[in-house]
Amino acid sequence: MISFRDSFEYDINHTEAGQSIIKRYDLCDEVFTSDDTNIYILKEIETGEKQLLKAIRLKPNIEFDIEKVMRVNHEGIAKIYEYYTSENYLYLIKEFVEGIDVENYIKLNGPMNENNMISLIIVVIYSSFDSPFKQFSIQY
């Protein structure tokens, strides 16, 4: 069990990173919470645009190269618009996408069977190719 001073609730309200987020966004709906991750739907105060906040508890000896992750540009992967860090958390402001991600699908429905997983992987890989590869169709 984590102490309150190490919790998301404390961090978002008492750190510079958390205050930067709260000044720009309203935390609307909680999507997922665990000891290590908190996910909320945000609404940007100025524009009303929905975005997603993913707060990841930092752990010793695990590093994120967030700049590389932010350069990923694929239609099947939610974009990371900006990030903030505090002593205990990495905060990602991400593109809000309607629907369910694979992690939550598995939590709700149990492990994916092998055929569904292979199909998903093929679609993601295939969609990342540019022409001339798209001239071939894939049946799955």
Image (cartoon, helix red, strand yellow):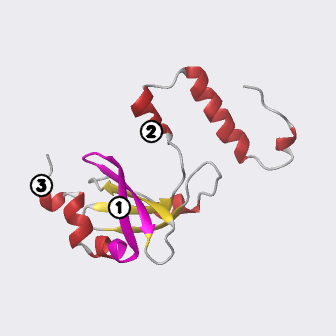
Name which residue type carries label 3: Ser
Name which residue type carries label 2: Glu
**Residue 91, quarter of picture:** bottom left
Bin the neighbour count of mark 3 within 10 Å (Cα to Cα): few under 14, some 14-19, many 20 and up: few
Residue at 13% from the left image edge and 58% from the top image edge:
4
Eye-nearest disc, 1 or 2:
2
SS class of the residue under badge 1? strand
SS class of the residue under badge 3? loop
Instruction: State how far apart marks 1 and 2 are (Cα).
Output: 19 Å
Q: Position of residue 119 (x, y in %)?
A: 64, 29
**Residue 43, quarter of picture:** bottom left
Pointer 3 and pointer 2: residues touching (CB < 8 Å)? no
Position above or below: 107 against 60? above
Instruction: State how far apart marks 3 and 2 are (Cα).
Output: 26 Å
Q: Position of residue 73 (x, y in %)?
A: 63, 57
Foreground of the two, 33 or 123: 33
Q: Does the magenta-highlighted stretch encompass residue 4?
A: no
Name which residue type carries label 1: Leu
Foreground of the two, 28 or 33: 28
Whichever of callouts 3 and 1 sits on the residue coming sooner in the sequence is 3
The disc label shown at residue 90, or none: 1
For disc 2, the marked residue is 103
For disc 3, the marked residue is 3
Q: How many marks?
A: 3
Instruction: State how far apart marks 3 and 1 are (Cα).
Output: 18 Å
SS class of the residue under badge 2? helix
Q: Position of residue 45 (x, y in %)?
A: 43, 75
Residue at 77% from the left image edge and 26% from the top image edge:
139
Residue at 83% from the left image edge and 43% from the top image edge:
134
Residue at 20% from the left image edge and 57% from the top image edge:
7
Whichever of callouts 1 and 2 sits on the residue coming sooner in the sequence is 1
State the extent of the magenta-drawn residues as a range.
20-43
